[in-house]
Image (cartoon, rainbow, N blue to C red):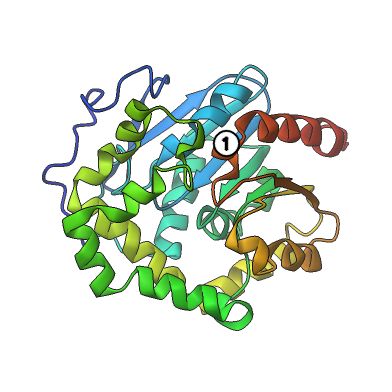
Amino acid sequence: MTIRTAGHPSIAQRPGWLPVEEFPFVSRHLEIDGHRLHYVDEGSGPLLLLVHVGTWSFVWRDLIVALRDDFRCVTLDFPGGGLSVPADAYETSIEEAADVLRAFVRRLGLDDATLVAHDLGGPVALLAFAGMPERVRGLVVAESFCWPLGVENAKVARMLRLVGSRAVRALDATTNVVARMTSTSFGVGRHVSRPGRRAFRGPFRDRAVRGRMLAMLGAAGRSDETLARVEAVVRGPLADRPVLLTFGAKSPAVKEGFPERWRERLPQAGLLVVDGGHHFPMCDDPSLVARAISGWYREEVAARP
């Protein structure tokens, strides 16, 4: 899928719809394979690489603010999302996003990383690090998966294919309904002000950005072969890493047994369930999640020789 860049906010300066009060970070930029990538690099200390694919780095805002005094927090907007502009030829797939992340990690020389991965960011991050597991110290999983959905969660796979269907994309092109719903308390908006919700929706003024997000979700519902490779990474080179699972108590992923499926593969994994949380637990209770990550890192990651 080719994403147009016309109308996309300039990355040369902060766009007018993004007040510094709502996104209090220095915006950094680099070019990789023709993509103009926006990223955030805040704080100092052990490295947390925060990976989310579908919306943009705003979803990590409150968690970064809570953790940057003790950790170096790095995250990026994938091509065609947030403040990043894609090259003309950019396919919407887990593999393509993993290629971008792998190049980003190598360009910045990111080593000894603890991956903090949400939703599609999980399989993307795991696939990206398949050939460089020595760079990974630990893994925080937030509402994500690492197995072929069509095999173990057929209902979820069907839902993703529906969301990415031509009909839903056409509806969203005229209504922006997905971004509007995601900015509510059922998404990222539980502790976000009205100006903050507007800022989150800023990139989705561009129909191409909206279309790419939904196409990515739809592709994930048809990616069992790729997800089998992701599962092999979890069972293989990363099987011995410390893991912290984070889910919202009201999330459909909990009802679908995602935490149990992770523990079948990684029995050492710890589990944090955010009371009242939905699909974005790090937004539902950022202080709780930040404390959990800090304590887990100190006891499970830093304590390792």
Dot 1 lies on which element? Answer: loop
Residue at 67% in and 40% down:
114
Q: Amino acid at mark 1?
A: Leu
Q: Nearer the viewer, residue 189 or 28?
A: 189
64 vs 221, left or right, is: right
Q: Position of residue 302 (x, y in %)?
A: 82, 32
Q: Is residue 86 left or right of residue 222?
A: left
Residue 175 screen position, x and y as percent: 20, 55
Q: Position of residue 117 (x, y in %)?
A: 58, 48
Q: Is residue 245 above or below residue 41?
A: below
Is residue 109 visible from the viewing direction of this image? yes
Considering the image in quadrants, where does the N terminus appear? bottom left
Q: Is residue 171 above or below residue 29?
A: below
In the image, 274 versus 90, the foreground residue is: 274
Residue 76, visible in the rendered structure: no
Q: Residue drawn 60% across and 25% down? A: 72
Q: As displayed, is residue 19 above or below residue 144?
A: above
For residue 174, what is the image quadrant?
A: bottom left
Q: Give the residue at mark 1.
A: 110
Residue in view at x 52 percent, y 45 percent? 51
